[in-house]
């Protein structure tokens, strides 16, 4: 908040010369400051935040407008979507990126305070819900969601991860309000609480679950993709800014599309850039943002995502976080359609890449893909000292996970990976003779 206060004080001093929050009058020839709120460590928003900022595409698009204005971009980094919404409804942020549940709260709050906002594009999504995960401590005896009854669970209330927790508990027959002790904590605080043993589980969004697993501080208990409901993050813009500076908003969306193409075309390099900017391990970034990562990046506002938002409203209402929300009036794709022109229809029709097993060899700028987990294991067994990271997709949900953190099942000649013990157990129950094996035994079987 200190950084924000300093930035706002500077803006006040510059008022005679510049406009804060995109409030300059068209044709005035003044400086327009476009304030962008983003979440650097929420890495499925990087095409509208961390990576976009690193590449400088937005500034280049603004400089190419030649409309009589001088443009400046004020990037403001936050841990979650809630403070971005607070700043937007205070008229201090023009463009923000956040998850599906925070987007709806943004819509509700904006309408309530007569500062309406609109969803103008998507960033990263997973059509099954794999972007959110519930994790426990490495030595935890909890093996399924039902084991959470009566336990302490940390999450960020109103976040996409909280939505996953609520839905998952309801499906497991646990009252999300009374069946657990829920602690409303920022992701970093929740991660520390899990490590300290003061909570039994943590439900969070990217990249926290995988980061903790990669560091050996957590293991997966529930894969959000078990819900089989889309989760995504998107870009929201204030209605005032969009109306006053449509060309600047279109410039942002063009730049976002460029960053999306960069990430999809150079996933390893993009992961390295994001890692450098955030301090996250590149191996974790790639798990989500890689060629076959958990997140699919596409700015098009696909019908599946809009439909998911409408389903999310009921969850927020049941939690008494909001009332009715008119999703159709909140979603406004006119700007992204104009910004992307004829390419928009192609992006809208695009499908996520099929899952694949991948190895990232040490010292390599490329990954190696394999058609089956067993083929990947065969390579790993022969190159154990030369591996930076290895990824496999859950055999039922398709969620990518670290090969050495997965739950492995031997089923005849097949070696099958799962993100959680629960999804592995589902397979074991349906396949007589199948059994779980350690990662080491899986490597030995494949060698």
Image (spheres, rainbow, N blue to C red):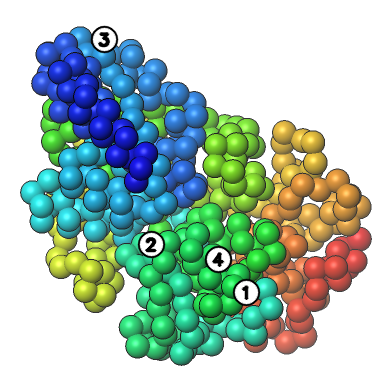
Q: Nearer the viewer, residue 149 or 217?
A: 217
The 10 Å Cα crowd at callout 2, few under 14, some 14 to 19, many 20 or more, is: many
**Residue holding disc 3:** 66
Q: Earlier in the sequence, mark 4 or mark 2?
A: 2
For residue 324, what is the image quadrant?
A: bottom left
Residue located at (79% from left, 36% from top): 363
Q: Which residue is mark 1?
A: 137
Q: Residue at x 49, y 26 (%)?
A: 55
**Residue 178 appears in the rendering:** yes
Q: Name which of mark 2 and mark 1 comes first in the sequence.
A: 1
Is residue 147 rendered to the left or right of residue 104? Answer: right
Is residue 222 in view from this perspective? no
In the image, residue 85 sits, relative to residue 60, either above or below, namely: below
What residue is pinned by disc 2?
Answer: 160
Question: Could you say which quadrant of the image residue 447 lies in?
Answer: bottom right
What distance separates the C-alpha of mark 2 from that of mark 3? 39 Å
Point out the tag, 2 or 3, that comes first from the N-terminus.
3
Q: How many marks?
A: 4
Crowding near the residue tagged with mark 1, few <14, some 14–19, many ≥20 C-alpha atoms within 10 Å: many
x and y, in percent, of residue 105 in the image:
24, 58
- What residue did someone put label 4 on? 192
Q: Quadrant of residue 394?
A: bottom right
Answer yes or no: do the residues labelled 2 and 3 have beta carbons within 8 Å? no
**Of tags 2 and 1, which is closer to the observer?**
1
Depth-wise, is mark 4 or mark 2 nearer the camera? 4
């Amino acid at each position: 908040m200190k950084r924000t206060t300093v930035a706002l004080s500077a803006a006040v001093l510059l008022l005679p010369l510049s406009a804060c929050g995109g409030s300059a009058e068209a044709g005035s020839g003044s400086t327009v400051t476009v304030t962008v709120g983003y979440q650097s460590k929420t890495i499925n928003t990087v095409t509208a935040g961390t990576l976009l900022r690193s590449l400088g595409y937005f500034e280049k698009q603004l400089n190419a407008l030649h409309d009589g204005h001088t443009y400046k971009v004020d990037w403001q980094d936050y841990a979650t979507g809630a403070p971005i919404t607070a700043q937007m409804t205070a008229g201090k942020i023009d463009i923000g990126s956040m998850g599906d549940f925070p987007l709806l709260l943004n819509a509700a709050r904006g309408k309530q305070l007569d500062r309406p906002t609109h969803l103008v594009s998507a960033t990263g999504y997973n059509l099954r819900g794999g972007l959110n995960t519930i994790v426990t401590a490495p030595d935890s005896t909890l093996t399924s969601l039902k084991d959470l009854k009566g336990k302490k669970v940390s999450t960020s209330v109103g976040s996409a991860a909280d939505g996953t927790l609520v839905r998952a508990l309801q499906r497991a027959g646990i009252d999300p309000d009374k069946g657990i002790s829920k602690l409303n904590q920022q992701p970093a605080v929740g991660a520390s609480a899990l490590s300290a043993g003061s909570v039994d589980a943590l439900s969070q969004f990217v990249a926290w679950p995988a980061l903790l697993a990669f560091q050996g501080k957590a293991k997966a208990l529930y894969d959000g993709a078990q819900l089989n409901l889309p989760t995504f993050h998107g870009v929201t813009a204030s209605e005032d800014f969009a109306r006053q500076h449509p060309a600047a908003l279109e410039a942002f969306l063009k730049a976002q599309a460029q960053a999306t193409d960069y990430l999809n075309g150079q996933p390893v390099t993009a992961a390295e850039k994001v890692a450098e900017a955030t301090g996250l391990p590149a191996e974790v970034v790639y798990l989500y943002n890689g060629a076959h990562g958990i997140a699919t990046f596409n700015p098009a506002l696909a019908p599946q995502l809009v439909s998911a938002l409408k389903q999310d409203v009921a969850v927020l209402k049941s939690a008494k976080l909001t009332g009715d929300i008119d999703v159709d009036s909140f979603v406004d794709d006119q700007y992204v359609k104009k910004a992307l022109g004829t390419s928009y229809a192609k992006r809208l029709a695009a499908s996520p890449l099929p899952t694949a097993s991948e190895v990232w060899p040490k010292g390599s700028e490329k990954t190696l893909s394999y058609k089956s987990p067993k083929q990947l294991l065969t390579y790993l067994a022969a190159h154990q000292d030369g591996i930076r990271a290895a990824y496999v997709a859950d055999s039922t949900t398709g969620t990518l996970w670290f090969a050495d953190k997965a739950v492995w099942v031997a089923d005849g000649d097949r070696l099958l990976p799962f993100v959680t013990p629960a999804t592995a157990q589902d397979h074991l129950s349906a396949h007589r003779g199948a059994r779980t094996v350690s990662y080491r035994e899986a490597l030995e079987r494949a060698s």
